[in-house]
Image: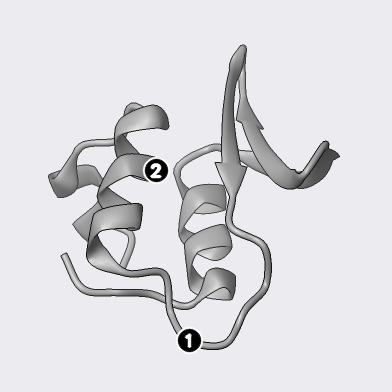
Amino acid sequence: MDPVSRSELIRRLRQLGFDGPFVGGKHQVMIRGRLRVPIPNPHVGEVGRNLLARLLRQAQVTESEWEATR
């Protein structure tokens, strides 16, 4: 799993059925059904592998599902 930009993370989560991002406190969130996944705030650089893995686990997205959104 390679690092991705914030905009690519959002685009690919949308492909997986998530809506948003929406305002959700300190971080924006993306929503699919009752599932809410926080999105990192805009910053310089990419979303690294470790953070991406944690976000996908929270989103209940498998690595193969993620790779299929390329």
Whether residue 20 appears in this view of the structure is: no
Viewport quadrant of the N terminus: bottom left
Residue 53's x, y, as percent? 25, 48
In the rendered view, tell whether residue 3 sits above or below residue 58: below
Amino acid type indicated by mark 2:
Leu
Viewport quadrant of the C terminus: bottom left
Tag shown at residue 45 = 1
SS assignment at label 2: helix
Amino acid type indicated by mark 1:
Gly
Question: Residue at the location (14% across, 47% down)?
Answer: 64
SS assignment at label 1: loop
**Label 2 sits on residue:** 55
Residue 44's x, y, as percent? 57, 87
Residue 67's x, y, as percent? 20, 59
Q: Is residue 57 left or right of residue 31?
A: left
Whether residue 21 appears in this view of the structure is: yes
Q: Is residue 62 left or right of residue 52?
A: left
Question: Residue at the location (74% across, 47% down)?
Answer: 28
Question: Which of these two is toward me, 37 or 44?
Answer: 44
Tag shown at residue 12 = none
Image quarter of residue 48? bottom left
Question: Residue at the location (57% across, 60% down)?
Answer: 10
Image quarter of residue 40? bottom right
Q: How is this picture coloured?
A: one colour
Question: Residue at the location (48% across, 63% down)?
Answer: 9
> Which residue occupies the extreme front position in the image?
26
Please tell me how many numbered marks the rendered image carries: 2
Q: Residues within 10 Å of mark 1 (few under 14, many from 20)?
A: few
Question: Which of these two is toward me, 49 or 11?
Answer: 49
Measure the alpha-carbon separation of dots 1 and 2.
Answer: 17 Å
> Which residue occupies the extreme top position in the image?
34
| Mark 1 vs 2, N-terminal side | 1
